[in-house]
Image: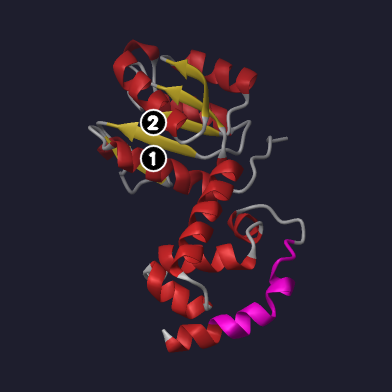
Amino acid sequence: MALYRLFHAIWQSGAEHYDDTGGEKGPDSRLKALSASKRAALLLTAVEAFSPEETAFITDESPEEVETAILDAQKTIDGQLASKVLIIEDEPIIAMDLENLVTELGHKVVAIAATRDEAVSKAKSERPGLVLADINLGEGGSGIDAVNEILSSFDIPVIFITAYPEKLLTGERPEPTYLIAKPFLPETVQATVGQALFFHPVAKQAA
């Protein structure tokens, strides 16, 4: 902790230079949008796994100030990540469950599609910032085909949620970055949604 305290003091003396985002978009810019104290509190606890009390020693603040900084940082990041979501799922109950989960995180579900064609059409009209997709849509076609067509026009993160992960994890082609197996835990979906949005650069429409 003493070493981290020294590093923090040195870093803090040059924090004003680090705060310049240079117009970049992505994870770094999201962190740089936080004040130096909030950024330090969040990274020391979430990444380095220090307790609030240990973080308070490192940053020369009180534990109460650290906890407040962490909550403020999380709220700021949650606000930055708020997005429009398209759900591609042919099972109504599962689709409703996913809608409730992402809505609780502050996102807006703009459409639920049960077929490939409907998914592509909704993506073009609603311009979502995130897609949650099943791969087996029954008679509605393939969720993989729907996602491939969507990604040909939009650069957005996609999370596959499926009972058949072996259809994607073949090792024969580029595999999806985000994959959740059914049945899923709510915490897994929520954590993966946050990760997908945080680490994806601002979406750009393809030429």
Which numbered marker is on residue 152? none
Magenta stretch?
Answer: 8-21
Q: In percent of the image, x 52 and y 40: which residue is there? A: 157
Q: Nearer the viewer, residue 202 or 177?
A: 202
Disc 1 residue type?
Answer: Gln
Q: In the displayed structure, would residue 138 be above or below residue 56?
A: above
Residue 101's label in the rendered image is 2
Q: Amino acid at mark 2?
A: Leu
Counting residues from the start of the chain, the first of labels 2 and 1 encountered is 2
Residue 204 position by quadrant: top right
Residue count near mark 2 (Cα–Cα under 10 Å), binned few <14, some 14–19, many ≥20: some
Quadrant where the N terminus sits is bottom left
Judging by the rendered image, the residue that carries numbered circle 1 is 190
Rendering coords of residue 173 (x, y %): 40, 45
Residue at 61% across, 21% down = 126
**Residue 120 in magenta stretch:** no
Q: Position of residue 69 (x, y in %)?
A: 53, 60
